[in-house]
Image (cartoon, rainbow, N blue to C red):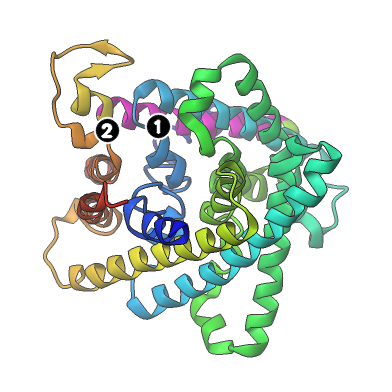
Amino acid sequence: MNQIKNFTKGFIKENPVFILLLGLCPTLGVTTSAFNGLGMGLATTFVLVMSNLVVSLVKDFIPDKVRIPSFIVIIASFVTIVELTMQAYTPALFDALGLFIPLIVVNCIVLGRAEAFASKNNVGSSIIDGLGMGLGFAFALTLLGGVREFLGSGAIFGFNLIEGDLMLVFVLAPGAFIALGYLIAIINRFKKA
Amino acid sequence: MEYFVIIIGSIFVSNIVLNQFLGICPFVGVSGKISTSVGMGGAVLFVLTIATMVTWIIQYYVLNPLGLGFMQTIVFILVIASLVQMVEIILKKISPSLFQALGVFLPLITTNCAVLGVAILTIQKDFNLMEGVVYAIANAIGFTLAIVLFAGIREHLDLMEVPKQMRGVPIALVVAGILALAFMGFTGLV
């Protein structure tokens, strides 16, 4: 029961984007379409799970003073793995996400979970925490990407639902801020109720 | 002429915050008051310029000759993290009041994607050292401009009657969107 709660908290109750407001840069930057959002979310999930796993394994050997730099090195290693793998196998997605793949390393969610959760808990629950938080992040990005893609071009995941250009601004930079602002407001509305 | 294009391009046309989405965390977090946002802008200017300079030198004189290009992400983040620590120590000595004002956000510059982002972009765009430094300064000015404008709007926003669900971050994001819309007017300037 506890582990299930640990897993599902990332989706709504402690959703990294909508509630904790962490990792806003990639959230706004890559969500021009639902597919890009999903790709970014899954890449971050991989880094989150692996770094949580390693951090919880080595937490007893790392002196307290060099804790944060060590975490950053662990995270950066996995980010490099993701970067090279995506460059080799999904070049189109790699180009679409661009700069934001190396920037996973400075995503507050990853370091935040390593510091707040993985450095205090055992391996099993750290992996579940990473998976839950990562998938919650992916869910938020896919949702925002889907909303922007639909409002901007009338399509979701590349499938055309409505012909012609709609509100092109939602695919451009300003639309990202506005769409996320309203999404958070809607979620606030339901949180209070 | 080339420098001029870099400067105008990075401050207005592809503003680092409003167009490239780098450094959103401090943009939303420390933009409550104009004075703090100016301080944050100054800290970013300082760190960004030094970090870009140091990472450029490391990339071209250490990583490239040794064929360690794939280590870029790891090395850059370590360099930036140690630089921020240094800035923190120096600032604590020189200007305690500014240090107090920036408080928790100075260590957070490490995880400010603007710094790492600009360092990587400088390499990706094949700038030489001088162009890289100009690019970094221009981006930091662009960041400061955006965050100060935003703080100015938010100070007024506090006095407005905003619907309950929109208070705080949601209305701030919508306002940032409108600000980004205004900056789109600069498109095609260079």
Label 1: chain?
A: A
- Provide the chain ID for the residue under circle 2: A
Horizontal relation, residue A68 to residue A161: left or right: right
Residue B66 visible in image: yes
Q: What is the quadrant of residue A64 in the picture? A: bottom right
Q: Earlier in the sequence, mark 2 or mark 1?
A: 1
| Residue ranking furthest to the right | A61
- For the residue pair B147 and A125, the one nearer the viewer reads as B147
Quadrant location of the C terminus of chain A in the rendered image: top left
Residue B155 is tagged as none
Query: Is B109 contained in the magenta span?
Result: no
Q: Quadrant of the N terminus of chain A?
A: top right
- Magenta span: predominant SS is helix
At a point 53% along the width and 25% down the height, the residue shown is A94
Front one among B112 and B101? B112
The disc at residue A141 is: 1
Left or right of B151? Residue A130 is right
Q: Which residue is mark 2?
A: A171
Question: In what element is the residue under mark 1?
Answer: helix
Tell me where the magenta segment starts and ends, as one range.
A124-147
Where is residue A136 drawn, in percent x and y?
Answer: 46, 31
Q: Amino acid at mark 1?
A: Leu
At label 2, counting other C-alpha atoms closer than 10 Å, the crowd grade (few under 14, some 14-19, many 20 or more) is: many
Taking depth in this image into account, of A181 and A123 the one nearest to the observer is: A181
Q: Are marks 2 and 1 in contact (CB under 8 Å)?
A: no
- Residue B89: x, y in percent? 70, 78
- Amino acid, disc 2: Val
Was residue A131 drawn as part of the magenta stretch in this picture? yes
* Left or right of A110 in this view: A151: left
